[in-house]
């Protein structure tokens, strides 16, 4: 009996250790994934903020009074102890009943996800690292627990057999469990946790140094500043998205698993191919050119009707028409293939880059150097074309060539060679499946038709007559334009449709098309309920 009890106690201790090792792996993997995938909130830092939020005031005061400037260190020690205790409990819980442990670990993972997402400027991408870490932690815990002797084989007290925990078969390995195999699993987990944490730190410090370089970068004033914005750009309706999209809210689309970390001191752009003059630009060369500053609305070809893969920013950059004037394309060239440091490429029609529109090699977005995720230090921005054929981020190579000779990342995957942005009206208020008070309802949204402009937006309620709405001021034909209107609806469920007109192509088509191969089309239809 005594020996059995001792061995049961030892096994419980091992289960606690398994919990702690699994927690370490969870956090280590989450940190590594965060350094890899996103440039924002690392899970441990975000968790630290949440921890502060939930620390009672008196304890915070005590910590500051006692530890002074060491209060941050005290925070992490306190957090470490709390996590260790919780992990030990979860390890023991998992040993007795796997579901209990699994639910506990998952809940802990979701707390980390919530911490990360509650940070200013977080995007849904930022949830990924914590989720991956949680999966790794769960898997490791499962593997370690499976190597412990089954709880039933070593009852800690003479409990009736039917009160014994989960069947041994669920945990024991074929051939019986072995302590050596447990220690191997726990050792591997701990080593992996340490390696992941170290890797995360190393990657993170590269990121921090690039981020620091980005922050201290001074950009020149534009030779041609953005035109002064007219008053009345925003529709006076609550819930319409801001006319200028703040950088942290700007949609992000790319194939980069890891955000490229480029150094302005070594960045170079090679300009070559069917040109009379090939050359290479350094970042300093680029900044010495006459830069233009323009508001331009970007749109992703994958944006569904009514979707939000569209954003409007102020860009500062070197006009591509000037670059091409210097390179002097040869007769027969009809395309510029731009390639990023990570191998993405886009094929842009050469005439588009020479027709006078403000296509540029952008270095700034809304008065700051490009955020890392948006192409730091240099990206392309071309008014009027979907991003996949024009907006190459982290650009390092421009080849003047022919569509007949070269293809690009998405055209290789079945998307169209040409990608002009389709005219689109979007309803933002009321929200899809939203609720409003019956009576008069203020509605509003945005419409875009880059390089052509928006001249009319109409709406129809419950398939009634099309009514023309009020357009907000227009900054330029390259930016989206807000609209608003007042409708009257009785209680019940309603349908609101919207459509835009541009001066070149006329009324936007009502023909429904999927994003593949060259952009979604059709009139948006929003269901809402009035009560
Ligand atoms: N290097 C690189 N640049 C890229 C992409 C990419 O996958 N890799 N995606 C393009 C696509 S499809 C779009 S819509 C825009 C999105 O730019 P954003 O992430 O700054 O909004 O970037 C374009 N530039
Ligand atoms: Mo895109």
Image (spheres, rainbow, N blue to C red):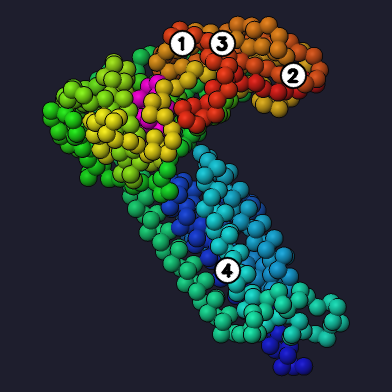
Report which quarter residue 391 is drawn in: top left
Q: Please give the residue where the numbered disc 3 appears in the rendered image.
A: 457
Q: Please give the residue where the numbered disc 2 appears in the rendered image.
A: 494
Taking the image as shown, residue 527 lies to the left or right of residue 514, namely right
Q: Please give the residue where the numbered disc 4 appears in the rendered image.
A: 140
Q: Which residues are magenta?
A: 378-392
**Foreground disc of the pair 1, 4:** 1
Earlier residue among tags 2 and 3: 3
Q: Residue at x 24, y 34 (%)?
A: 399
Q: Is residue 237 magenta?
A: no
Quadrant of the frame with the C terminus: top right
* Quadrant of the image where one finds ligand 2: top left
Q: Are marks 2 and 4 in contact (CB under 8 Å)?
A: no
Taking the image as shown, residue 503 lies to the left or right of residue 223, namely right
Q: CA distance from mark 2 to mark 3?
A: 19 Å
Q: CA distance from mark 3 to mark 1?
A: 14 Å
**Foreground disc of the pair 3, 1:** 1
Q: x, y (%) of residue 248?
A: 47, 36
Q: Residue at x 41, y 45 (%)?
A: 256
Earlier residue among tags 3 and 4: 4
Taking the image as shown, residue 365 lies to the left or right of residue 459, namely left
Q: Residue at x 39, y 38 (%)?
A: 412
**Residue 268, numbered label:** none
Q: x, y (%) of residue 277?
A: 13, 30
Q: CA distance from mark 1 to mark 2?
A: 30 Å
Q: Please give the residue where the numbered disc 1 appears in the rendered image.
A: 505
Q: Are marks 1 and 2 in contact (CB under 8 Å)?
A: no
């Amino acid at each position: 009996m005594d020996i059995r009890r001792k061995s049961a106690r030892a096994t419980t201790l091992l289960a606690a250790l398994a919990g702690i090792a699994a927690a370490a792996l969870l956090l280590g993997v989450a940190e590594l994934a965060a350094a890899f995938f996103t440039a924002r909130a690392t899970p441990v830092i975000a968790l630290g903020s949440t921890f502060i939020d939930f620390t009672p005031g008196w304890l915070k005061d005590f910590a500051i009074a006692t530890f002074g400037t060491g209060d941050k260190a005290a925070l992490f020690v306190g957090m470490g102890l709390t996590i260790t205790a919780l992990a030990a409990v979860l390890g023991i819980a998992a040993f007795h009943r796997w579901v209990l442990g699994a639910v506990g670990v998952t809940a802990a993972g979701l707390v980390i996800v919530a911490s990360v997402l509650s940070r200013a400027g977080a995007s849904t991408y930022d949830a990924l690292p914590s989720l991956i870490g949680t999966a790794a932690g769960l898997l490791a815990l499962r593997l370690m627990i499976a190597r412990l002797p089954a709880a039933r084989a070593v009852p800690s007290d003479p409990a009736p057999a039917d009160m014994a925990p989960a069947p041994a078969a669920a945990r024991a390995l074929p051939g019986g469990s072995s302590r050596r195999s447990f220690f191997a699993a726990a050792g591997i987990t701990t080593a992996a946790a340490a390696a992941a944490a170290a890797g995360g730190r190393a990657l993170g410090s590269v990121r921090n140094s690039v981020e620091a370089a980005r922050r201290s970068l001074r950009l020149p004033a534009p030779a041609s500043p953005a035109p002064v914005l007219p008053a009345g750009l925003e529709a006076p309706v609550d819930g319409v998205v801001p006319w200028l999209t703040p950088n942290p809210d700007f949609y992000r689309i790319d194939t980069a698993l890891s955000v490229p970390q480029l150094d302005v001191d070594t960045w170079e752009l090679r300009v070559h191919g069917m040109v009379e003059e090939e050359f290479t630009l350094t970042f300093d060369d680029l900044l010495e050119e006459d830069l233009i500053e323009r508001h331009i609305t970007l749109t992703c070809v994958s944006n569904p009707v009514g979707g939000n893969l569209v954003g409007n920013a102020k860009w500062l950059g070197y006009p591509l028409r000037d670059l091409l004037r210097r390179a002097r394309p040869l007769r027969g060239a009809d395309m510029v293939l731009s390639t990023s440091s990570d191998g993405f490429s886009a094929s842009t029609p050469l005439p588009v880059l020479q027709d006078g529109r403000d296509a540029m090699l952008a270095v700034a977005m809304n008065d700051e150097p490009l955020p890392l995720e948006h192409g730091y230090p240099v990206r392309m921005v071309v008014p009027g074309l979907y991003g996949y054929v024009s907006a190459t981020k982290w650009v390092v190579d421009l080849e003047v060539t022919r569509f007949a000779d070269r293809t690009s990342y998405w055209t290789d995957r079945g998307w169209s060679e040409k990608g002009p942005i389709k005219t689109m009206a979007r309803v933002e208020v009321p929200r899809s499946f939203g609720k409003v008070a019956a009576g008069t309802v203020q509605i509003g949204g945005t419409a875009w038709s880059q390089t052509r402009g928006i001249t009319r937006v109409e709406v129809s309620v419950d398939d009634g007559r099309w009514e023309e709405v009020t357009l907000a001021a227009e900054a330029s034909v390259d930016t989206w334009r807000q609209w608003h209107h007042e409708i009257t609806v009785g209680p019940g469920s309603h349908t609101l449709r919207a459509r835009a007109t541009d001066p070149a192509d006329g009324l936007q088509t009502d023909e429904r098309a999927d994003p593949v191969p060259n952009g979604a089309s059709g009139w948006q239809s929003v269901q809402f309920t009035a009560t």
